[in-house]
Amino acid sequence: MLIRREGETDAEAIRAVTTAAFGRQAEAVLVDELRESQAWIPALSLVADESGVTGHVLCTRGHVGDVPVLALGPLAVRPGRQRAGVGSALMHAVLGAGDALGEPLVALLGDPGYYARFGFRLGSEYQITPPVAGWQPHFQVRLLTAYRPSVRGMFRYAEPFDRV
């Protein structure tokens, strides 16, 4: 398996993997809309390539107050390749890339039981809150090397997330 940046010809394969992984098109449409937004960070759209795209992870620009941070999601793995290490490989790669780019943290909405293995903790532990109070039990943050304790407040996703 090769983890690499999304290439010019990968959009259709990413759309197919994301739709299959989530069982609906909403997340695939979100990826397409993010790709066209100012939140897009090309270096943080990664695919797992196993003689074809079998997984994808994306970090885009989010904010905690006025501080630029990363928003992770969606993470998608083709159903036949789930629980085979593809998602873990993508997560380790995108977290390492975000750290190398000097980003302070990564935020996401997801299952704490899954994401804890990658160092994610509830945002409330760092005084970082989700934009919707009901998300609190699933809103998580992973600190990176450039994190400063003064980064706290309400997190906000890029505008395309508002439509999902």
Image (tube, grey):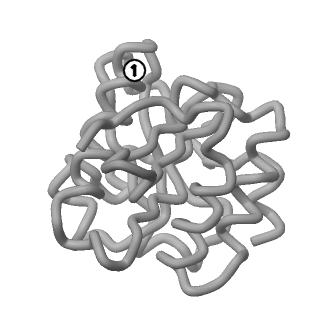
Q: Please report the residue visible at 76 percent of the width from the left and 53 percent of the height from the top.
A: 32
Neighbour class for label 1 at 10 Å: few (<14), some, many (≥20)?
few
Q: Horizontally, is 151 left or right of 92 in the view?
A: right
Residue at the spot of label 1: 148
Q: Secondary structure at mark 1?
A: loop
Position of residue 56 in the picture relative to residue 159 (left or right): left
Q: Residue at x 31, y 46 (%)?
A: 91
Task: Indicate the quadrant where residue 94 lies.
Answer: top left
Q: Quadrant of residue 68?
A: top right
Q: Nearer the viewer, residue 156 or 115?
A: 115
Q: Indicate the amino acid at tag 1.
A: Arg
Q: Could you tell me which residue is drawn at 82 percent across and 51 percent down?
A: 159
Q: Residue furthest front?
A: 51
Establish if 72 lies above or below 19.
Answer: above
Instruction: Relative to 146, say whether 1 is above or below.
Output: below
Q: Nearer the viewer, residue 148 or 7?
A: 7
Residue at (32% x, 46% y) in the render: 90
Along the viewing direction, whichever of 7 and 108 lies nearer the viewer: 7
Q: Position of residue 89 (x, y in %)?
A: 23, 46
Looking at the rendering, in which quadrant would you find the N terminus? top left
